[in-house]
Image: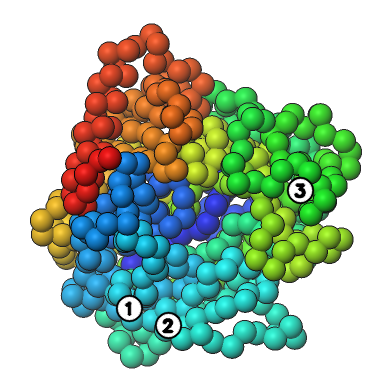
Amino acid sequence: MVFILVDDMGHSDLGCYGSEILQTPSMDELAEGGLRFTNFYNTGRCWPTRTSLLSGFYPHQILSDPMPGVNYDTEQLAPVTDRWLPSILKDHGYSTYHSGKWHIVRHRPKYSRLSFTEVGFDRSYHTEDGRHLRPRHLWEDGQEIALPGPEEGYEASIAIVDHAIKYLKEHKEKKGDAPFFEYIAFIAPHFPVQALQEDIDMYRGKFMMGWDEIRILRAENRKELGFEAHEVYPLEPERFAPWNLSPEELITQIDSADTGRAVPWAELSREQQEFQALKMAIHAAMITRMDREIGRFMDALKELGYYDNTIVFFCSDNGASTEIMNRADKHTTGAIPGSADTYLCLGPGWSSAANTPFRLHKTWVHEGGIATPLVVHWPEGIKKGNEFRNMPSHIIDIAPTLLELAGGDPDELNVSTEAPGRSLIPFLNHDLEIPRTPLFFHHENKKALRHGDWKITTIEDGGSWELYNLAEDRGETQNLAEENPKKLEEMVELWETQRNNIVEQVGADLK
């Protein structure tokens, strides 16, 4: 079993999900031979999604994502479980391997990181600093390792797959056809956007049409691919991460042609358009490189005889990012864009395009922040490929799915608190509609709940509830809260009940 997680990739950044110029042939091939889920969700942020993936619980139940009204400085709080998916898989005879980003954290009672051994991996290669071309720290099996020299070259996606293949080959040599679980966690295309110049060259000048036209093209492409058509919400220049650089900081610390607002493309100067098009070219280069490395890993599965009976999952930890920062070893003004000396961020204009046809971005719990592609590929287990699966599902469903594949039971995730997810195995060969408990979301005091086709959400801390019928309006363009107050009240009550249950489960009292 293999789970591939990418970082800050938009819903339509894959060719098989609607991208127009950006090339992802490896993922497109996996989708053509497998399944594409259309209503799959993450948590809207990196560490909560990773926690849910490896635990089978909402991050709030594991004390990974704070809940409003809960005092995290008290010792009485406890996660609902200390059992992790990799450890349980080992009980079923699996070897477990990790390569890439880690970022599993808890607020218990202080911010702390769990180690790969605590979670249950046999081998681990990991990076945390998000630098794609010049890492500051690398670890293998918990020990910091020497950094590659300038003459050796380094690109994060290549290095992550190098180690994933290394562990795969070691497994074949030592354990033959015994089962394994490999978790490959790319840091691409998370900011800063950095890529090999040869990869950037593929896309230079290709995005001068701008984000307005790209959004239209992607929406049209999705219809041709067979996705349901939904109206695309207009750009929202007023919506950006509150910790972003100010406009004054952006043009002095990064580049005078940069912009931190999702304004219409025609309002930008020619210089700004060229700079923005180059940033999107770097983003595209990162995704294409990542896709190429996924193809190399799939080739290794074939060479080692694992391909046909290995189920592969692929998704993103959140939507594309509107964040614009300058941190770590900082941006060097005048450096070649996309090089290791730069700290460019995609920004809200292109993030809006990457998340087409959905609204808003990473850290929001509107669809642009929490909706992700999910591709599932398994030659021996999926009878008919190139199909869609439309039922609402969530990253909490992955752990029970993998446990069932391993011959285990979801109850093994915890003996006292029922895990909230459900196995996706029944859906691999049938597009079923089976009722499920509502899907709960909360991050940075933004709240949401999906129940069937209905969804409620808030746009900001303290903001009023919005109500949408996603079957008719996945783009969240028509707020139905005023015209359907009864449904709104019902949905809010469901959210509050679920919130209260989680708070009680971790041993807290609401302030």
Residue occupying image coordinates x 46% and y 34%: 461
Quadrant hosting residue 500 = top left
In the image, residue 379 sits, relative to residue 205, either above or below, namely: below
- Can the viewer see residue 180 in this picture? no
Residue 254: percent from left, percent from top = 79, 54
Q: Nearer the viewer, residue 215 or 334?
A: 334
In the image, residue 473 sits, relative to residue 106, either above or below, namely: above
Q: Earlier in the sequence, mark 1 or mark 3?
A: 1
Q: Which residue is mark 2?
A: 142
Q: Amino acid at mark 2?
A: Gly
Q: Which residue is mark 3?
A: 249
Q: Which residue is mark 1?
A: 117
Residue 384: percent from left, percent from top = 35, 49
Q: Amino acid at mark 3?
A: Glu
CA gap between label 2 and label 3 equals: 37 Å
Q: Of tags 1 and 3, which is closer to the observer?
A: 3
